Amino acid sequence: GYIGPDVLADGLNSAFIQGNIKYYEYAVMQYSVLIPLIMIGALGVGGLAYVARMAMYGEEFGVIRTFFSGVAKTWRYSLIGGGLLLVIFCFYAFDAAAFGGPVNLGAKIVTIILSILLLVILSIYSFYLVTMACNYKTRFFHTLRDAWAFTFMRLPVNLLGCVYVAII
């Protein structure tokens, strides 16, 4: 009844194990590209919000110079918002990969609903965080707190706005 070394070595070379190793290699490559791109995109959103603010006030501005001024002003807030969204994207991808096999259907449904709810709430938070950083001069942690308060203060209206944006 003991398992010999030849059986263990044969098990490591099986197609199932090799397939899992390939899957994780591709996942690491995907996320090593996805992480920097989401962070660069978050910086761009901060610059774009600053340009939109200047256009809304009707001031004269150069688009490229104002964009980079906005990136310089909002980079911390943009990276926090983008990082939170990145964590939720990774969590959602983990849910899809981990619960793709034979797992309880109730667990699949609950985790996917929670992942989508977190994604929507953190998207709203990131929106408020970047726009408040562009428009108000407050301390760093006050801006984080105020964006959190705006997210939950009018949550039904915010969720309705998300549904409206999703439909458009």
Image (cartoon, rainbow, N blue to C red):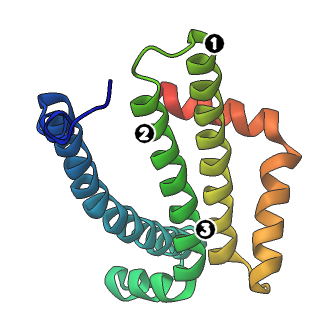
Q: Quadrant of residue 5?
A: top left
Q: Nearer the viewer, residue 100 or 3?
A: 3
Residue 39 lies in what quarter of the image? bottom left
Of badges 1 and 3, the one in the foreground is: 1
Residue at numbered disc 1: 106
Question: What element does badge 3 sit on?
Answer: helix
Which mark's residue is nearer the viewer, 2 or 1?
1
Which x, y percent locates residue 63?
35, 79
Three-letter residue code for mark 3: Val
Q: Position of residue 24 (x, y in %)?
A: 26, 47
Q: Position of residue 147 (x, y in %)?
A: 76, 63
In the rendered image of this protein, does residue 34 appear above or below residue 100?
A: below
Residue identified by numbered label 2: 93
- Pointer 2 with pointer 1, Cβ within 8 A: no
Q: Residues within 10 Å of mark 3 (few under 14, many from 20)?
A: many
Name which of mark 2 and mark 1 comes first in the sequence. 2
Camera-side mark, 3 or 2 = 2
The residue located at (39%, 32%) in the rendering is: 97
Q: Is residue 82 above or below residue 122?
A: below
Q: Earlier in the sequence, mark 1 or mark 3?
A: 1
C-alpha separation, residue under disc 1 versus residue under disc 3: 36 Å
Q: Residue at x 83, y 68 (%)?
A: 145
